[in-house]
Amino acid sequence: MAGIFDKLRKKSDEREVKKLMKLADQIEALEPAMQVLSDAELQGKTALFKNRYQQGETLDDLLPEAFAVVRETSVRVLGMRHFNVQLLGGIVLHQGRIAEMKTGEGKTLAATLPAYLNALTGKGVHIITVNDYLARRDSEWMGKIYRFLGLSVGLIVHGLSAVERRASYQSDITYGTNNEFGFDYLRDNMVIYKHDMVQKELNFAIVDEVDSILVDEARTPLIISGAGDKSTDLYFKADRFVHRLKQDQDYEMDEKARTANLTEEGVSKAEQYFSLENLADIENSEYSHHINQALHAHVLMKRDRDYVVKEDEVIIVDEFTGRLMLGRRYSDGLHQAIEAKENVKVQRESKTLATITFQNYFRMYTKLSGMTGTAKTEEDEFKSIYGLDVVVIPTHMPMIRKDFNDVIYLTTRGKFTAVVDEIVQRHALGQPILVGTISIEVSEMLSNMLKKRSIPHEVLNAKFHDKEAEIVA
């Protein structure tokens, strides 16, 4: 039955691509006319397009010529010419849909087409990437196209002042991460005066790795907190108490459900340690809360998996990307409990001032689109939550990559021994290898195994966040 549905979906995509090809052919036909234009004439097209838009023409009317201009500009300033499949991807993105393009097919370059076209309205275009490194790289790299054509390019990364952020948002096209855009929205909703806001209208967003941001992280809350006024002494006391407890005897843990609770014996020990008659009494709720968070911090939160300690500060590691989430803190006292556990300075417990999920934030854009290498399998979620459909864009050349079936092992040790054996074989053939792991801890364990086999390699995880660009290069 699944096979029948797959065939129907494939035919549907093929029909859709055929429709889009007619538009791509129009863009292709304009290429000779663009090639004979001087740089000044090509640059002058932006003012002409803006004037035509103000006179009543739609973006769809301008699309073939605007895309042809961007394509020719890319050839001149970057030495890269958009392939037909990238034109198709650009059309899909402009239509407010999701373009599924295989890895290496040039999603970054494809996004320049709809970004330029939609920036002609003057309402701004936001291009969302998954990290600061990509946002900075793409704004500088692809920004050469936009700047040649007279458009301004902004960049939103961690550490900018409000003045710098406001200037970036006023640009025609702004690059940045989903976290930065979301937090700026929350901060804007906390200011007293409108002129203190940094964002303008949420007009059009192009989301890279859209499945990760709009599905995997959809319900992740962005939270802005303010400092509370309670003492931090109880965190240390709760931490010392939890150190004494024994699993199964004093507490029960379910790692899969990420829960840990005191047993009756554990409760009895808590009452004795804190000199309480009944831990369950309402007046003892603060003790109960601190003990539960200390227990959670000790038995469920793992250093170098969930967080790292850097310069005597506990920094959260993003479970989806493995990156450091600078400035983010766990809520409800959990962060303080971890600080007590790691014996670093405990910051005062915070209280939530503003919060929003990625799902709710991105649904506020007038037009939303996205691109990724894997979206078709989640099309039902995209449709029901965001009203977005997925179009599978064919590859420029026939696929030569082989996708093998998963291999399952009886033990973790057996799995990683097999991984290292495979790496050794591939390395001997001179093949570059990328190995993805689920945590810092696992990446370092695998690194140690490779060192024992004398295999030269680089480790890229949250601990080496600052060296990322150097390692990738």
Image (tube, rainbow, N blue to C red):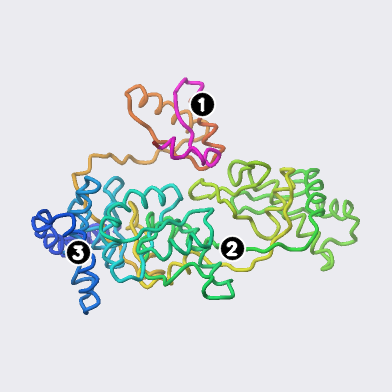
Disc 1/disc 2 C-alpha distance (Å): 39 Å
Quadrant location, the N terminus: bottom left
Structural crowding at the residue carrying mark 2, measured as other residues with C-alpha within 10 Å and reported as few (<14), some (14–19) or many (≥20): many
Disc 3/disc 2 C-alpha distance (Å): 43 Å
Label 2 amino acid? Answer: Ile
Mark 1 or 3: the one toward you: 3
Label 3 amino acid? Answer: Lys
Q: Can you identify the residue that label 3 sits on? A: 45
Give residue 202's position: percent from left, percent from top: 41, 70
Structural crowding at the residue carrying mark 3, measured as other residues with C-alpha within 10 Å and reported as few (<14), some (14–19) or many (≥20): some
Q: Can you identify the residue that label 2 sits on? A: 223
Quadrant assignment, res 95? bottom left
Q: Can you identify the residue that label 1 sits on? A: 449
Q: Nearer the viewer, residue 375 or 137?
A: 137
First in sequence: mark 1 or mark 3?
A: 3
Residue 349 belongs to magenta span? no
Residue 455 belongs to magenta span? yes
Give residue 352's position: percent from left, percent from top: 65, 66
